[in-house]
Amino acid sequence: MAPTPTARPLPNVLLTCLVPVASWFVIRPLLDPSPPLPALFASVGFSIFAFLAALYLIPALGPTFVKANLKGRDLLKVYSDPIPESQGLVCASIYILLLILFIPFPFSNSVGSLPDSGKTLEGLQGVASLHHELSIYLSSLLSLLMATMLGFLDDVFDIRWRHKLPIPIIAAIPMLMVYYAEGGNTHVVIPIPLRRFFGVLVNLGPLYYLYMSLLSTFTTNSINILAGINGSEVSQAVIIAMSVILNDLLYLPWPIDFKIPLHLLGSQAEVEVGGAWHAGMAYGSSELVDRHLFSLYIMLPLLGVCLGFMYHNWYPARAFPGDTLCYTTGMAFSVVGIQGHFSKTLLLFFLPQIFNFVLSCPQLFGLVPCPRHRVPRFDPDTNLLYASKVLFLRPPSKTASFVLRIMSSLGLTALTTHPSNGTILEATNLTVLNFLLVRLGAMNEKRLVQMLMATQVTGSLLAFVVRYGLSGLVYDGDRR
Amino acid sequence: MAPTPTARPLPNVLLTCLVPVASWFVIRPLLDPSPPLPALFASVGFSIFAFLAALYLIPALGPTFVKANLKGRDLLKVYSDPIPESQGLVCASIYILLLILFIPFPFSNSVGSLPDSGKTLEGLQGVASLHHELSIYLSSLLSLLMATMLGFLDDVFDIRWRHKLPIPIIAAIPMLMVYYAEGGNTHVVIPIPLRRFFGVLVNLGPLYYLYMSLLSTFTTNSINILAGINGSEVSQAVIIAMSVILNDLLYLPWPIDFKIPLHLLGSQAEVEVGGAWHAGMAYGSSELVDRHLFSLYIMLPLLGVCLGFMYHNWYPARAFPGDTLCYTTGMAFSVVGIQGHFSKTLLLFFLPQIFNFVLSCPQLFGLVPCPRHRVPRFDPDTNLLYASKVLFLRPPSKTASFVLRIMSSLGLTALTTHPSNGTILEATNLTVLNFLLVRLGAMNEKRLVQMLMATQVTGSLLAFVVRYGLSGLVYDGDRR
């Protein structure tokens, strides 16, 4: 019997065609006349290479991982072949290496990424801020690399989840240190209704650093705990990355002009996007363009590797991500949120994760017992997944019963009660996956991950409505 | 039986006294009036903390490593208890984390590391170059972290040595990319006798990048192949780090004035060191002071962790370094050599490693068979080490015989020949350790590592004589 389930075949001819396309994107900025936003061209090229590299290296390195004892059984399958585990390490390595090779494109004078004086486009960075931007980019890379390293150590040393919750804070340190050394802004804009108490701007000082480190903990762990079925971690990363990219694109200088009729959604004004080099929604602010370009440089290759990995992690999975993937992607989202100064918008793209976290709280904080695995239960006969349950060996406390009954009445969990005295005997585990199974009934694993993705997409759509529609109610255009 | 040989006891009272000392060094730069070279104070403090952290964390984490299957048997001992392997990872993690926490000291205006205008000391950096310096520091950290990561992957996946030779080049990429993006200098100063052909300065262009990547391969692998007995890797790192630190100190602005009578060694002039803030041998060049300060920031904490680790790695070893330690220390030496622009001086401190490499060439390049382990042979009865031998199953080729006979006549190897026809039957393995055993006779492991250290110290003394004595014959003061 083969040591792993057969690797998924790749459409080689189709993929070969992508190589010249990617090469063109990388080489184009070096040719004269250089295109507007040349580094973005290169970033697109690198991202296609990232996709291809992940697609080919994941199956190629699978046996090496299995040999080094980095393997796992798929608990929701009838077969028990070892599947290579921690292959997020391959994704992370490709990703970070490409981000490093990308350095000269935005940060070197020689690559012609800077428009000559005289033909400066609105909203594009100048030479002066180059060193500063490079420091920020490098500190972000350091944080990403530390997250990868810590994720892999977690996989190798199998750290218990209660102990590993604060680990992402360590990975965030380089970013925080450079933010501090460069005299980073620690002011936040106050929502309009609260301005009478705090004023327009409040300096959070050290609290701002606490906020940034908690953000990295949240983005990392929230993806990690919404896991357990094939493709769940990587599909979250893919959809969040796409949402961030879409949001970034709104702030670039587009040569076309269109309006979004957001007043229909309650915004105070229509949102005008673009117009001949009007820097999109940045309205001519080169700082905003810079920040969102930076975010694109980080997000595009992440999307590339994640899509490549998803091909092999899709049901039935031929590769497992391990904690490494969650740590790296989670840190990448924190990096763009913090360095791009749009952490509130970023958090909106994590609505399903926030929901999952709130739902999990009774189990995370010990009110309801928390088994080691809360993944749905697999029935080999029907090939369907059912919501997994926590059994109460002792009757739950009064508080726990109260919380569970409320959650049950909201449809968030299903309870089994004692037929005579009504004591709670069982409750479905409090995760989004089990919630979906409780609401929609048993389904197979592929269908469940599709439902999860649909939830994530819905969350992102809602996020855009809130960000560009409703936020007009509590914020004006002041975006310092 | 205990899972590992008992951890070495620590003099807790003595060590506790170091905590306030280290704290004072870290806090002193924040107090007014700030001392000259305030960041150097902090660096000394961090290095003491690095020493303490390594001293306590190495034994504390030993069982975790053994549990994660990162363990090895000591081949040169009578007992076969598992010893934690790859603990260089602990050293590297402490080291890099401290280097990151150190960032605000030299690179932030707020910590007062910059003298106020008006009382600017000669040879100290200005605000302008701060961003630039920070980029260089961050790219160095990235290279160090990549080296650590790759070293650990090497330990986990057990990469074959022929495949892993070029791995350090990957770790050097961040450094090279930033060097390129920042428009780094690729000119070299030509020795006086060759100037009639090439001029004073030659632009090596891309060849300079090749040189830098080969340097990182050399510093990393050369320490790795001079290994095999307790304390060998870390003692090399300690002595090289001390040599680099001593060399750096010569370029700092010292308040005392003294002369080194180097004309006795053939130098064209006496070397005048120091004099009231005359920036030591930098002769008022702030660039030279900056470079050597940078080197000290990298080297001091390295010395700290290495000394802490050496305590546990000393004969009989309670912890093994793994490839991780060699990768991280090797990359640290490359970083200071390249970013400090003293790679030629650095290579002089690697004389024993160069000797070991040249000696190993016949085995590395396949002329003489190379067994997987070339460590000396241990005799359990006498507790002594003997030079290990390579057995010729087939008679060696004519070239190999010729080379071996020359090496034998130079005393570099001992041959066993056929009593009648003189064919070579055996030769001692071509490493410095076996060479020492051939020349000085069998000795125990502790004595052998002491001999190795003596060799390394002698090499460094010779290096200083060559650098400050003989180099005057081929270089003038031009040090661009």
Image: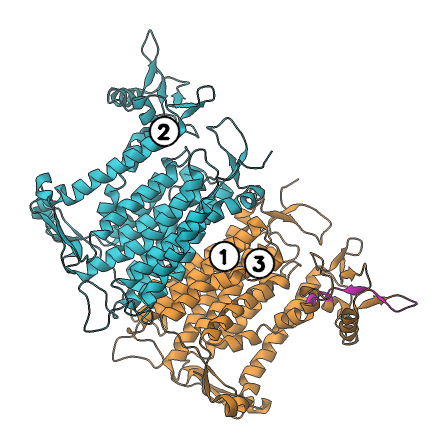
Chain colours: A orange, B cyan
Q: Chain of mark 2?
A: B
Q: Which quadrant of the structure image shows residue B407?
A: top left
Identified at 81% across, 58% down, the residue is A393
Other-residue count near label 3 (Cα within 10 Å), few / some / many at <14 / 14–19 / ≥20: some
Label tally? 3
Q: Is residue A199 left or right of residue B269?
A: right
Amino acid carrying mark 2 in the image: Arg
Q: Residue at x 77, y 75 (%)?
A: A406
**Is residue B285 among what the camera can see?**
yes
* In this view, the mark in front (3 or 2): 2
Q: Which percent across, then down, holds residue B3?
A: 58, 37
Q: CA distance from mark 3 to mark 2?
A: 44 Å
Subunit bearing disc 3: A
Residue underneath mark 1: A148
Closer to the eye: label 1 or 3:
3
Q: What is the crowding at mark 1: few (fewer than 14 residues within 10 Å), some, or many (at least 20)?
A: many
* Residue stretch in magenta: A419-434
How far across and down, in percent of the image, does residue A265 sit? 59, 89
Magenta span contains residue A427: yes
Left or right, B387 with reference to A153? left
Q: What is the chain identity of the residue bearing mark 1?
A: A
In the image, residue A70 sits, relative to residue A21, either above or below, namely above
Quickly name the residue at label 2: B447
Of the numbered discs 1 and 3, the one sitting upstream in the chain is 1
User: Can you identify the residue that label 3 sits on?
Assistant: A164
Q: Residues within 10 Å of mark 2 (few under 14, many from 20)?
A: some
- Relative to residue A248, is residue A323 drawn left or right? right
Say which of A342 and A67 sits in front.
Answer: A342
